[in-house]
Amino acid sequence: MSAPARVATPPTAAIIDGRALARNMRCDIRARVVDFVSRHGVVPGLAVILVGDDPASAIYVGNKIKACEQVGIHSRTIRCDQGVTTADLLALVETLNRDPAIHGILIQLPLPAHIDMPAVLDAIDVNKDVDGFHLYNIGGLIVGSTVFSPCTPYGVLKLLEHANIPIEGQNVVVVGASNIVGKPTALMLMARDATVSICHAKTRDLAQFTILADILVVAAGVPRLIVPQMVKQGAVVIDVGINRLPDGTIIGDVDFDGVARKASHITPVPGGVGPMTVTMLLSNTVDAAARFIV
Ligand code: NAD
């Protein structure tokens, strides 16, 4: 008698649809912009500084500019040569700080190695720091007094809220400890009274941490780093990773098909955290414009 055919277990996790949430939020932001312009006669403005000709950075900037157009935010892209100096960038930031048509300033990262990145980021007026990378905003995450929260962690929080995931008292594991994603995400979830562990490339036996997570946020930049055996049954899994395979396919850090059979909720890549990052930038920019109205 031949063995019965194996039937693949269907995914059981609810998909947290970042694309749909971003679409809804952008409708609300657009309405806010229309209202803001009619009340104050001022169009919220975002300046984006793009250094060099890295194709990925150019795509990210293009997406941000397109998103601004969709919601009625005025945007200006300033392109600088790869050889631009720190002094040039500081002068540019200073000019934008004083420009009344610009309410938000974003410097697309990474910057070339010869640039003093912290100096340039810290030169941005805190009230225009819509990416949330100024030292004041980073430090403010510790005490809960940021002017603007960094966009990707803010987007992660919005996704969890939208899916009605309780955060208080939950075991959260963040895989990835970068200054722009992992650490601020951990701090923002701690501020919501989660019990947070942060793992990174030097963590020994990653699985012994991830298996305890009620909420697992993965931002390592390693394709399929998280496999089902590393995930607790019923966990909420947020995949921040964006990895381009040699065939051009974009995948996250989580083995989606496998983990979706174990998790209660999961974000897809693409269509999860990515669209939320840009949406939170738009939201921060409108908030920034509102701060300039007295
Ligand atoms: P990064 O390279 O600055 O940091 C990666 C972190 O992951 C480091 O702390 C490193 O120690 C850790 N790490 C690396 N390999 C690991 C491993 N095997 N086990 C455990 N930890 C490991 O990257 P980043 O800027 O924080 O970005 C992380 C990922 O998120 C990337 O794929 C990036 O493209 C993506 N990203 C997505 C968005 C979005 O909007 N969806 C925004 C920013 C970054």
Image (cartoon, grey):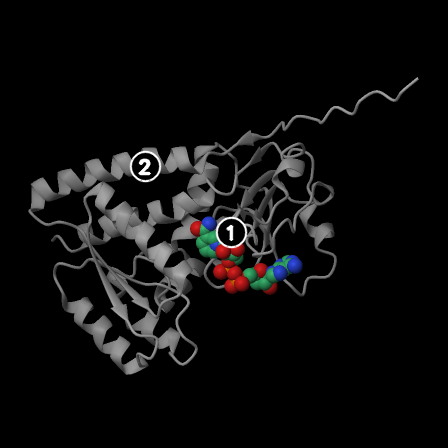
Q: For ligand 1, which image quadrant applies?
A: bottom right
Residue that label 1 marks: 242
Numbered tag placed on residue 25 in the rendering: 2
Q: Residue at x 30, y 74 (%)?
A: 81
**Quick check: 97 above or below 27?**
below
**Number of residue marks:** 2
**Identity of the residue furthest to the top in this view:** 1
Q: Is residue 19 left or right of residue 218?
A: left
Residue at 33% x, 56% y is: 61
The image shows residue 226 at horizontal and vertical percentages of 66, 48
Q: Is residue 176 left or right of residue 142?
A: right
Question: Could you say which is closer to the camera, residue 139 or residue 179?
Answer: 179
| 93 or 53, nearer to the observer | 53
Q: Quadrant of residue 10?
A: top right
Q: Which of disc 1 and disc 2 is earlier in sequence?
A: 2
Q: Is residue 81 visible?
A: yes
Query: Label 2: few (<14), some or many (≥20) within 10 Å?
Result: some
The residue at the point 31 percent across, 53 percent down is: 62
Res 182 seen here: no
Q: Amino acid at mark 2?
A: Met
Q: Give the percent coordinates (x, y) of residue 13.
A: 60, 30
User: Dot 2 lies on which element?
Assistant: helix
Query: Does ligand 1 reach within 8 Å of label 1's beta carbon?
Result: yes
Circle 2/circle 1 CB separation < 8 Å: no
Foreground of the two, 286 or 53: 53
Classify 7 as above or below 97: above
Q: Secondary structure at mark 1?
A: loop
**Mark 1 burial class by Cα count in 10 Å: few <14, some 14-19, many 20+:** some
